[in-house]
Amino acid sequence: MGEARQASLTVQVPQAVSDRIYAAPTAAGRPIIVIDAGHGGRDPGATSVSGEVREKELTLALARELRDQLVQRGRVRVALTREDDRYLTLEQRADVARRLGASLFVSLHTDSAPNPLARGASVYSLSDVASDAEAARFAAAQNFGVAAEAADSSSVTSMLADLAARSEMNASADFAARLVGKSAGRFELRPDPHKFAAFHVLRRADTPAVLFEAGYISNVDDEALLRSPEHRSKVVLALAQAIEADVAARSPR
């Protein structure tokens, strides 16, 4: 008889993504909004000009505050892609929206630029053609490491998918316009604040989706504002009102 041997096998299991839904008792059956706090875990995002705060921390704070505001108002249900400091792929983030049948996907970020004077919030919606070279570069950076999607061999399936994508792009652009309208006068926006480009996470959410840049943490004034709960409450209120208006406009009469 041979000598018995022991062996071990280590399997890397990805961190679970929560599908927890937050809602007021009166919001049963209401549309689900997925809030995506950008970056997290080993991906810190941009670092502030002071070096004291990272993008992943600010986006999570905004996501939690927006969740609480929406739940308190009671018109929608809410899910977060992450509730703590963890790394998620773009596909994992978008998959939360797909699994839950979300009515809207909002990805929260803060901006950074070599120009220390650049400041103000902006919103991006999905488009096959970028609004400008800057938007194209930003989308390419956000999509880094994502493999190109294989084309569907069925022309009928491909056509239906294209029609659905066009509808979602139009709805996303409508929401972006609403958000700009609700934000104007409450906090500083970039010139021409609505831009668009081919963001993978927005395309894969399979629902109207936008990426919101709350300001520049590479700017001294914007960093101070983004770290202020009072300022963030203005941003959160604009987001909440735009979300509710958008959901109401798309709901069956």
Image (cartoon, helix red, strand yellow):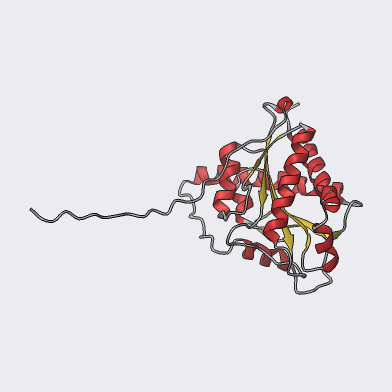
Q: Position of residue 209 (x, y in %)?
A: 68, 47
Residue shown at the point (49%, 53%) measured from the top left: 151
Residue shown at the point (71%, 46%) measured from the top left: 64
Q: Position of residue 123 (x, y in %)?
A: 76, 55
Q: Residue 14 or 136: which is nearer the viewer?
A: 14
In which quadrant will I find the C terminus?
top right
Q: Position of residue 81 (x, y in %)?
A: 62, 46
Q: In screen coordinates, is 3 left or right of 185? A: left
Q: Quadrant of residue 122?
A: bottom right
Residue 158 in sight from this viewpoint: yes
Q: In screen coordinates, is 115 left or right of 137? A: right
Residue 193 in sight from this viewpoint: no
Q: Residue furthest left?
A: 1
Vertical comparison of 39 with 17: above or below: below
Vertical comparison of 208 with 73: above or below: below
Q: Residue furthest right?
A: 185
Q: Position of residue 208 (x, y in %)?
A: 68, 44
Q: In screen coordinates, is 129 left or right of 253? A: left
